[in-house]
Image (cartoon, rainbow, N blue to C red):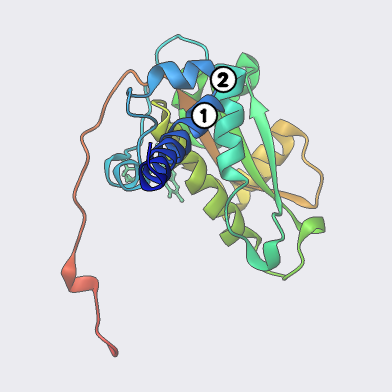
Amino acid sequence: MSGNGFATGRRRLLRLLALALPLAFLPAEARSKTPAAGPMGALEAITTRRSVRKYTSEPLAEETLREVLRCGMQAPSACNEQPWQFIVIRDRKILARVGDINPYAGFAKDAPVAVLVCGDSRLEKCEGYWAQDCSNCAMNMLLAAHALGLGAVWTGIYPLPDRVEGFRRLCGLPAEVTPLALLVLGHPAERPKPEDRFNPERIHADRW
Ligand SMILES: Cc1cc2nc3c(=O)[nH]c(=O)nc-3n(C[C@H](O)[C@H](O)[C@H](O)COP(=O)(O)O)c2cc1C
C-alpha cells in the first residue's frame, strides 16, 4: 500500500471506530432496540419526540435507565453547578399514589419506573438557576429515552406548592431538595405522531 493509501485506509478505520465505539458502551437492551445504523441522531430525536403515557408491561433494564440518567447529568448548568438529585421510583405503592398529588400523572401507576428530578439548593453555586439547570437535565433525559426507543413524559411539579409538598412527603425529601418534575418512563404502548411546530411568526429580527 502506498503512503497515501495507507493514510486513507487508516482514516477510514478511525471513522468506522468513531461510529462504532459509542454503540459498544450502550447497554445490551438499548443496543438491541436501536437501528443497525446506531442510536437515533440528535436532530431526529428532537423532531420526533412526543410524550408517551402508555407503557407495555416489559420492565425497564437498570443499564438503560442508567444511560438515560447519564444523559441527564450531561446537561449544561449555571456555573456548572449540576444541582440535580434523582429519586428512581419502582415501588408500585409509591407509583400508585402519584395520581393523588398530580391528577394528570395518574398513569404513573402503570409505568415500570418514574424518576423524580429534584434540585438541591446545597449544591447551588450561582443562586437562583436550579430550576433552569434541572429543566435542561430533564429534557436531556426525555430525548435520551426517546433515542433509546423508550416512551417518556414530563409531569409537572415545581412551582405548584401543593405538588412540591406532596412529592416531598411521598419520597421523604429533605427541605433543601425541591422536586421539579416526575418523568414517567417505559417501553411505549402508544406512538404519537411527530408534530411540526415551526412557526416563523415567533421569530423577530433584531427588534420586536
Ligand atoms: C412543565 C411541564 C409540565 C407538564 N405536566 C404534565 C402533566 O402533569 N401530565 C401530563 O400528562 N403531561 C404533562 N406535560 C407534557 C405536556 O402535556 C406535553 O409536553 C405537551 O402537550 C406537548 O406534547 P409532546 O410532549 O407530545 O410534544 C408537561 C410538560 C411540561 C414541559
Q: How many numbered marks does the figure carry?
A: 2
Q: Which mark is residue 96?
A: 2
Question: Mark 2 near ligand 1 (CB under 8 Å)?
Answer: no
Position of residue 105 relative to residue 121, above or below, is above
Residue 15 in the figure: left or right of residue 166: left
Tell me whether circle 2 and circle 1 mark residues in contact (CB < 8 Å).
yes
Quick one: 52 or 169, which is closer to the camera?
52
* Residue furthest to the front: 2
Residue 154, can we see it?
no
Residue 27 in the figure: left or right of residue 8: right
Return the x and y of residue 19 as percentages of the image width and height: 42, 36
Q: Quadrant of residue 82?
A: bottom right
Query: Residue flagged by tag 1: what amino acid is it?
Result: Gly
Q: Secondary structure at mark 2?
A: helix
Return the x and y of residue 51 as percentages of the image width and height: 35, 36
The residue that label 1 is drawn on is 99
Q: Residue at x 52, y 16 (%)?
A: 28
Q: Secondary structure at mark 1?
A: helix
Query: Residue flagged by tag 2: what amino acid is it?
Result: Ala
Q: Residue at x 49, y 16 (%)?
A: 29
Residue 28 in the figure: left or right of residue 35: right
Q: Quadrant of residue 39?
A: top left
